[in-house]
Structures are given as C-alpha cells and as structure tokens.
Amino acid sequence: MYKFEEYKLDPEIGAVVMGHDPSFTMSKLCLASLYINTYKCKFIVTNTDKSHLINGSKFPGTGTLM
C-alpha cells in the first residue's frame, strides 16, 4: 500500500486514463484521485460499460467507477 502523504506526485502527468484493469486496487484509485485533484489532470474513460454478462450473471463493468 502506498503511503500517500509521502508519495511524490510527478508534475509531468497530465491525464488519468481509466479502462478495464483486472488488477484494479484501492491504491490505484487513490493515486488517480490525487492526480485529478492536485494537478487538475484530465480524466479519460475508455470503457463506459455499466455491466458485463459472465456465464449468464451480470457483473459491474468499468463504467460503474465513473
């Protein structure tokens, strides 16, 4: 887990891109939020699916994180 109070943000970062990520973590979400709120980075969403059908069951898609 990141120690967010000690993390050095890179001022060269200008955007946060969100897409399908099978290894998504809360740390990644928090880090993205820091960049968006601190540097007003653009937030680019590449997959707005609200749900996916897997073996007949409906599961949340990446779009639920927007």
Image (cartoon, rainbow, N blue to C red):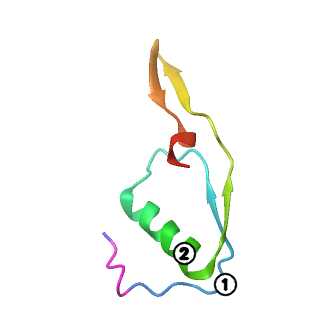
Indicate the position of residue 58 as horizontal and vertical percent values.
Answer: 46, 21
Q: Residue at x 36, y 79 (%)?
A: 4
The kind of residue on which mark 1 rests is Glu
Residue wearing tag 2: 37
Residue 46 in the figure: left or right of residue 20 = right
Side (left or right) of 6 relative to 19: left
Q: CA–CA distance between discs 2 and 1?
A: 15 Å
Residue type at mark 2? Asn
Instruction: Using residue 2 as the reference point, say whether residue 54 is left or right of it.
Output: right
- For image coordinates 52% across by 67% down, the residue present is 32
Q: How many marks?
A: 2
Give the class, few, some or many, for how many residues have Cα within 10 Å of label 2's Cα (few <14, many ≥20).
Answer: few
Q: Secondary structure at mark 1?
A: loop
The prevailing secondary structure element of the residues shown in magenta is: loop
Percent position of residue 2, x then y: 34, 74
Magenta-highlighted residues: 2-6
Quarter the N terminus occupies: bottom left
Q: Tell me, for residue 32, which label it has, or none.
A: none
Q: Secondary structure at mark 2?
A: helix
Residue at x-position 56% and y-position 49%: 66
Q: Is residue 41 above or below residue 43?
A: below
Q: Which residue is mark 1?
A: 12
